[in-house]
Amino acid sequence: MIAKMNVVFVLGFLLMASAFASDNSVGSCETNEECTPNYSGFKNNGTVATYLRQYTSQLVDKSFHFLIMSSAFNMHKLDRPGFEKLYRKISDKAWEDAIDLIKYQSRRGSFGYLVQPNKKGNYAKVLKTKELSSLQFALDYEKTMAKEAHVIHRAISHAHSNGVSKGEDYEHYDPDAAHYLDEKIIEYQSGVVRDLAGYINNLKHFTEKEAAADLGNHVFDEYLASVY
């Protein structure tokens, strides 16, 4: 009886081993000289990696935009410490997100180099901005980045049936990368968009009377300085 059980166990083990051996995604390192962490829809020059590479570059560009804008509020003719701190924080967060996204791509077996961002920067524009217009610019920029993150998330979190052989992963489908965007990028963006929209409405209220506009900007700047 024990001998029969041993035979059954060995046969079962052999069947499992042959099943894994027939799965190209598991046994690929046995047939290729180079083994990588690539799996599912994430390939070094694949759709997912291209999306993330582009978004990383956009984050770097965003960081420089807001760094320059923060310096515009730290000049003798426009000394607004609160606005400076707000835009410096946004700049630093974009820089940190870009670095973290490069690390994520590296962990998945890709090269996180930078490319030409989709949204070309106009750095001269942010140097000429004022209090209210700067908040409006910031909100538009954040919404653009958030929409782009949603487009990427939608593209990589849903599998489609075009041109896919049975048993193969979809080229663009990668739930791990979608989860990363959810946790690290998208959730934070919704809070920032809400805050900036609130700041714009409050500042409009403080400065709606032209005679009190300077005082309203000053009071609101002090509020930002206390928050950031």
Image (spheres, rainbow, N blue to C red):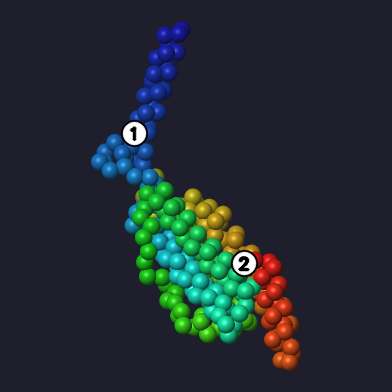
> Mark 2 falls on what kind of element?
helix
Above or below for 147 versus 44: below
Q: Where is residue 214 in the image (x, y as percent from the top left)?
A: 69, 86
Above or below for 167 versus 209: above
Q: Residues within 10 Å of mark 1 (few under 14, many from 20)?
A: some
Q: Residue at x 26, y 41 (%)?
A: 32
Residue 122 appears in the rendering: yes
The amino acid at mark 1 is Ala
Q: Which mark is residue 152?
A: none
Foreground: disc 1 or disc 2: 2
In the image, taking residue 219 as reference, residue 102 lies left or right, namely left
Residue 41 appears in the rendering: no
Q: Residue at x 49, y 63 (%)?
A: 95
- Mark 1 and mark 2 lie on one chain; the one further toward the N terminus is 1
Among all residues in the image, which is located at the extreme bottom? 211
The residue carrying mark 1 is 21
Q: Where is residue 49 in the image (x, y as percent from the top left)?
A: 39, 57
The amino acid at mark 2 is Val
Above or below for 98 versus 175: below
> Mark 1 falls on what kind of element?
helix
Q: Position of residue 220 (x, y in %)?
A: 70, 77
Q: Which residue is drawn at 41% across and 23% down?
A: 12
* Quarter of the rendering containing residue 75: bottom right
In the image, taking residue 119 as reference, residue 210 lies left or right, namely right
Q: Nearer the viewer, residue 141 or 211?
A: 211
Among all residues in the image, which is located at the extreme front? 76
Q: Distance between the residues labelled 1 and 2?
A: 49 Å
Q: Where is residue 199 in the image (x, y as percent from the top left)?
A: 68, 75
Q: Residue at x 45, y 80 (%)?
A: 122
The residue carrying mark 2 is 192
